[in-house]
Amino acid sequence: MPHTLDHLSPRRRQELTHVRDVILEELAARIEAAPSARARRYRLLKIILFGSFAKGTWFDDRKSGRASDIDLLVIVSHRALTDMSAFWEEVEDRLFHDPAIRHDVSLIIHTLPEVNAQLKQGQYFFSEIVSQGILLFEDAEPDKNGRPKNILARPATPDPQQTYETALKYYSSWRRTSQLFLETGQVHIGKTDLEIQNFSAFNLHQAAESAYRMFLLTVTLYAPATHHLGKLRGLVRSIDARLEDAWLPARRPYKRYFELLRRAYVEARYSPAYETTQEILAWQAERIEQLIEIADALCRERLERLRAEADL
């Protein structure tokens, strides 16, 4: 895996170095403050840059406000470290508010055995990261015999027919799920009761999440275990920016409308302070309907390619 960022400008290289240092600094502080001896053994093994900044296809469109995310695969030593949601949320919050970081940072956290298991199965998403990604950090400490450890497995060649059949199942299931959530949310948009409006908001969130899962699982056979629409949107954007068209125009008040949709998964159900309106719900439903249409078309493109590769 290459280590060089020479295809990037000095400014962007400096930004990526700063992002890496923030992650390492935050993890070191958390480990040092951990009360248990086990937690002090936690390690960050690798940070791998993937997506548009690794491939050289990033974009910054000041006119529309759209820009590529910095996509990172973070490989950690213990499963418990991937479950520390509060910790990683704090890291992401710091990355978001740091003035030296100009791009959104999207983190995917997995253990080395999890990544290697996917590589040995020929999983498309992780195989592409290994083949096209750039190593920003590696714990190069050898094992007790002086041999290299923390080695990534060699990606296997996937079975074309199995890949097609798996992708088709994902597509069919999540396409139906996204449509059902959208229809449920749309039915209640015209109601004035606050609880019913919040119920609509939650279902619209689920429709958008399902659309993103449909795309990710059909195209890459992978989707992270998160309900955070911002994270799913960022990951999808790094794979195919055409899905961003569903949320245009990217200006006020529509940025706030998306933020309300993102928050709906928790707050629309549990927070008495959460509020929405018929206008906001109608905009969200219209955008999600377009999101599903675009995702559906891109999934069909992918399935046709997979079917041809499987010679079916």
Image: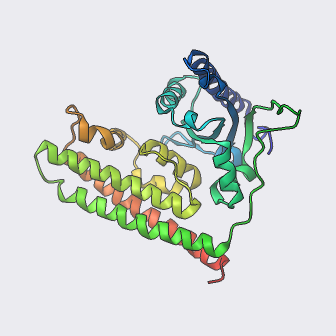
Note whether residue 297 is visible. Answer: no
Return the residue nearer the eye: 253 or 182.
Answer: 182
Residue 246: name its quadrant.
Answer: bottom left
Q: Residue furthest left?
A: 192
Answer left or right for 309 relative to 109. right
Count of numbered marks: 0
- Give the answer, above or below, for where 134 lies relative to 288: above
Residue 220: name its quadrant.
Answer: bottom right
Return the residue nearer the eye: 37 or 50.
Answer: 37
Q: Quadrant of the N terminus?
A: top right
Q: Residue furthest right?
A: 146
Q: Quadrant of the C terminus?
A: bottom right
* Residue 156: x %, y % from top left: 74, 61
- Give the answer, above or below, for where 54 lies relative to 168: above
Return the residue nearer the eye: 224 or 207.
Answer: 224
Note whether residue 113 is visible. Answer: yes
* Residue 224: x %, y % from top left: 52, 48
* Residue 171: x %, y % from top left: 47, 67
Return the residue nearer the eye: 56 or 252.
Answer: 56
- Give the answer, above or below, for where 195 lies relative to 120: above
Question: Residue at position x 40%, y 57% from top?
Answer: 210
Answer left or right for 58 relative to 265. right
Q: Residue furthest bottom?
A: 312
Question: Residue at position x 48%, y 66% from top?
Answer: 170
* Residue 232: x %, y % from top left: 48, 47
Question: Residue at position x 25%, y 46% from top?
Answer: 280
- Give the answer, above or below, for where 143 lies relative to 209: above
State the colouring used for the structure image.
Answer: rainbow
